[in-house]
Amino acid sequence: MREVLISRIDKQDKYQRILQAGITVFARRGVFRATISEIAREAGVADGTIYLYFKNKDDILARFFEARADDIFLRFRKAIDGAGTAREKFARLITCHLEAFQEDREMAVVFQAESRKIHAMAEQVNAISSRYRELIAEIIEEGQAEGLIRKDLYLALVKRFILGAVDEVVSTWVLAEGKYDLVSMADPLVDLFIRGIGAGSED
Amino acid sequence: MREVLISRIDKQDKYQRILQAGITVFARRGVFRATISEIAREAGVADGTIYLYFKNKDDILARFFEARADDIFLRFRKAIDGAGTAREKFARLITCHLEAFQEDREMAVVFQAESRKIHAMAEQVNAISSRYRELIAEIIEEGQAEGLIRKDLYLALVKRFILGAVDEVVSTWVLAEGKYDLVSMADPLVDLFIRGIGAGSED
Amino acid sequence: MREVLISRIDKQDKYQRILQAGITVFARRGVFRATISEIAREAGVADGTIYLYFKNKDDILARFFEARADDIFLRFRKAIDGAGTAREKFARLITCHLEAFQEDREMAVVFQAESRKIHAMAEQVNAISSRYRELIAEIIEEGQAEGLIRKDLYLALVKRFILGAVDEVVSTWVLAEGKYDLVSMADPLVDLFIRGIGAGSED
Amino acid sequence: MREVLISRIDKQDKYQRILQAGITVFARRGVFRATISEIAREAGVADGTIYLYFKNKDDILARFFEARADDIFLRFRKAIDGAGTAREKFARLITCHLEAFQEDREMAVVFQAESRKIHAMAEQVNAISSRYRELIAEIIEEGQAEGLIRKDLYLALVKRFILGAVDEVVSTWVLAEGKYDLVSMADPLVDLFIRGIGAGSED
DNA sequence: CATGAATGAGCTTTCATTCAT
DNA sequence: CATGAATGAAAGCTCATTCAT
């Protein structure tokens, strides 16, 4: 019983270690340049062991984002649900998003590199963007009900508009090697989404 | 003279054929998965011929974007210079951008896949984004002088905000396999940049 | 324990097999014409296996002579140390040298072909000649102290004179495909070194 | 008539230029590493032109030494015939040999690298050594008749003994990048051949 | 379960040689 | 005769994947 438990924990542990080692190496070399050997070395296991837990290199990436997606969206959900207005929800979502990436820069590197690729190695990566857009849509619709957000919007476009802008801000931070505080970008970003860059004199 | 001319055209032609074949295969398989053999087959030349014109695979990508960047930015410049107000300039820039990508979907596929990658294969790809941000900055500053655009903006952030949003819209179109008209997104996008999504009741 | 032992032997064995196969193929085709595939076939392993044990083709050559040099110079040293006079040392060194090459004709073939080349593939090969000349110098100096060898000698030249002569004798034997006894050349050679070809009437 | 003459000279010239360019490149890179393209560039002709004058790379090497051998042995012959005693002949042969190599270091580099190889690219290279040994034999036999050279010699060995020693001295000079005067080695070498290194007290 | 040595398919790159101009 | 672009065979090397231990 004890042995089974230990063994289960060990197994779990080895699985997790490979998962994390994968992201570390993917971040370091890029998914394609990463080799199974380097991941195995990073995880402290033999090359062959990788294949006991994962189908192949792509599978490591897929399983990683599959697992992380749930964690992160749970955090997003909590952040949003605790807020009153749609504007507040927006602010919390973006903040939470930037926090998550700032906390795990390796994940951010891999995500920014792999998302948006037409030849994405793992569709899980794209699935995350999709779920994210749904969140945005939800908040926007709420904001419209509240009267905060105007109703003459092409929702499909607005979702991309927001996701793209945030993504680019994260990418810039990643390429800058995380030398500044990413989260401080959240409020200015939300302000740009809501008010735009216009002086308001035009309307 | 005639012979020289023909030979020069032939040579030019072969260079261009390989360049285009490269982008076609990059779009089909992704830069990393693309092989020299497949590019050669696509171009209708022998494998070794590639090396008479290009240093290696990366060089094909670099030379392609190097050449295209100049064409495209010339178009951008013309479009902008013909416009009166900053708003008009914005509209024309975005339109022109979307047109260029819509015209050459293979280029769009490769660009969207390769830009933003931390392990970018060709710095030329990143250089393009950089030049693009400069154009945006120029228009914004003009708009501020005109009174169209508000002055309390963090310019570095605004540039990313706009580039990211447009990029994402292009990426979405690319992934949708170009099934709708990309250019029709230009005006709604510009409207979002200027006015934001807010109802205006907040201020 | 047994397994570890077997495995170590196997591994050692495979390393040695590749090493020997390398020399066999180098002797057969020449170092430059030899291919990894042929060496692998000769060793009974896959091409890729070569790279588990050696960096590349040159490395096989280098490791071979590195290992053999130590063996051979140990033999030389023992032979010399067991002798009394400088003349005896000379005789034993040359005998030992010819014996070593006669024992392993493949090594002799490769050595004769690769030593003395300005574009040497492995500096280990030239290092052997260098060590050999040092041995000669040592014996000569002893001989001079003993009064056996005259003192008005340009040592740097004498070392080449002796090494070159022995080398040529070995080369001739190699090119003759080992059809006669190489070691029987030792005494006549030493005699030539000591007495020269002169009748002695000149002095 | 004039045109034919010019053309013949041109043709001759182009042949010679390729021959010399070949040796230059062989000396620079080694025979195997040399490429037809580099030889063509060095000779100032097109790649394809090489094949109008030579069968292939090996053929350039063969033709070069074939031609040079005649020149050099003619010089050797003249030098020897002008001498009185066998000792004088010996001195002149060795001097002439070292002069010839010192005059054309590129030839020396290639010769030292290619001679003695069992996988010789051109048998002409080995033929030179053979002719050289015949000259030595001739002088020795004369010297024996004169009483200068002792009669109890194994001639086949003596020829190698002398050729090898001279060769090694040349090789050393080649590897030292020609930094000293090679010809000055002639007299000390002849002295070593005749008198040996012995003090003479042994007999 | 875990290992890691071995495999060999697959890729890049070079370069001798040809041949249309 | 001369050219040099084009060819494609041939080689080196990497690395995902397997499997005996």
Image (spheres, coloured by chain):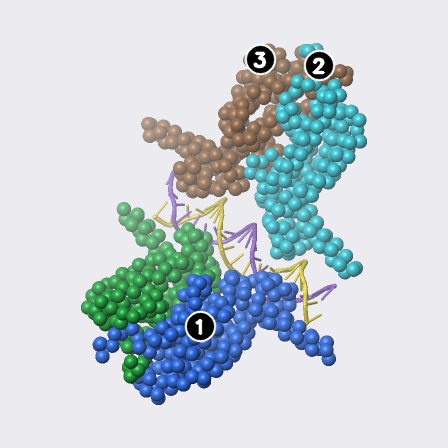
Chain colours: A blue, B green, C cyan, D brown, E yellow, F purple
Residue to which mark 2 is pinned: C199
* Residue placed most toward the observer, A32 or F8: A32
Residue at image position (27%, 74%) is A198
Name the amino acid, label 1.
Leu
Q: Is residue A2 left or right of residue D188?
A: right
The answer to whether marks 1 and 3 mark residues whose Cβ atoms lie closer than 8 Å is no
Residue that label 1 marks: A98
* Residue pointed to by mark 3: D83
Residue at image x 50%, y 75%?
A124
Q: Looking at the image, can residue B89 be seen? A: no
A24 horizontally vs A115: left or right = right
Q: Quadrant of residue A46?
A: bottom right
Residue occupying the point 62% across, 53% down: C51
Q: Is residue B8 above or below residue A196?
A: above
Q: Residues within 10 Å of mark 1 (few under 14, many from 20)?
A: many
Q: Amino acid at mark 3?
A: Ala
